[in-house]
Image (tube, rainbow, N blue to C red):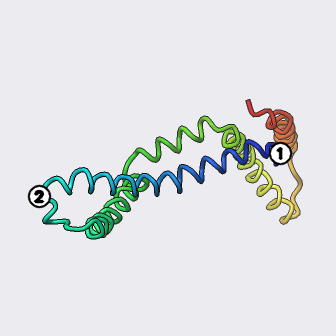
Amino acid sequence: MKKNIAFRSWYYFRQGWSTYFAFIFAAVNTLTVTYYLAIENIPLLKEIFPTFILYVITLVSIGIPILVLVGYVHFKKSSAYKAEADITIESHPHFKRMMRSIEFSIPLHLQLADILIKLTNDEKLSDEQLSRLSEIKQKLKDHMDTSFDLK
C-alpha cells in the first residue's frame, strides 16, 4: 500500500497546505487587508477600532462562534454535507467495494445465525438450507474474485 510514496507525500502536502497553512495565511491576510485598507480610511470605523489588535480581538471573538455555528449547521442541519458524502461514496472505489461486501455479509450472517440455532438445538439442516449455503458460498467466491477489481 505504501508503494506510492510520492503520491502519498503529495496528498499529505496538499492537506497540510490547504487545511493549515493556507487557512491561517488567508485569515491573517484578510484581517490585515481589511483593517489597513478599509478601517484606517473610514473615520467612523477608525473610532470603533482604533488599533489593529482591538480589531483582531473583536473579529476573532465574534467570528469564531459564528463560524463554528455555520460549520455545525453545514454538518448537522443542512442537506449539503449529506450530498457531499453521497457523492464521495458513489465515486470512491473503496467505498463501493465496502458496500458490496456489506451486501454480501448481512445475508451470510443471517444464514449462519439460522444454522447455529439449528445446530444448538441438535437439528439437521434441510436440503434447501444446504443448497442456499452453497449458493451463498458461490456468490461470496465470485465476489472475492471480482472485488479486487475496483473499476
Disc ID at residue 5: none
Q: Which residue is mark 2?
A: 43
104 on left or right of 50: right
The residue lying toward the viewer, choosing from 102 and 107, is 102
Relative to 128, say whether 20 is above or below.
Answer: below
User: How many callouts does the rendering have?
Assistant: 2
Residue extending furthest left? 44
Q: Which residue is mark 1?
A: 129
Residue at x-position 86% and y-position 61%:
119
The residue lying toward the viewer, choosing from 133 and 98, is 98
Q: Nearer the viewer, mark 2 or mark 1?
A: 2
Q: CA distance from mark 2 to mark 1?
A: 85 Å
Residue 131 can be seen, yes or no = no
Q: Amino acid at mark 2?
A: Pro
60 on left or right of 126: left
Q: Earlier in the sequence, mark 2 or mark 1?
A: 2
Under circle 1, the secondary element is helix
Residue extending furthest top? 151
Name the spot of residue 7 as percent of width and height, x first: 73, 42
Residue 75 can be seen, yes or no = yes
Q: Are marks 2 and 1 in contact (CB under 8 Å)?
A: no
137 on left or right of 9: right
Q: Quadrant location of the C terminus? A: top right
Residue at x-position 64% and y-position 38%:
92
Name the spot of residue 35 as percent of width and height, x first: 26, 57
Name the spot of residue 135 as percent of width and height, x first: 84, 37
Name the spot of residue 53 as percent of width and height, x first: 30, 69
Q: Amino acid at mark 1?
A: Gln
Residue at x-position 16% and y-position 62%:
46
The residue lying toward the viewer, choosing from 115 and 140, is 140
Relative to 108, say whether 96 is above or below.
Answer: above
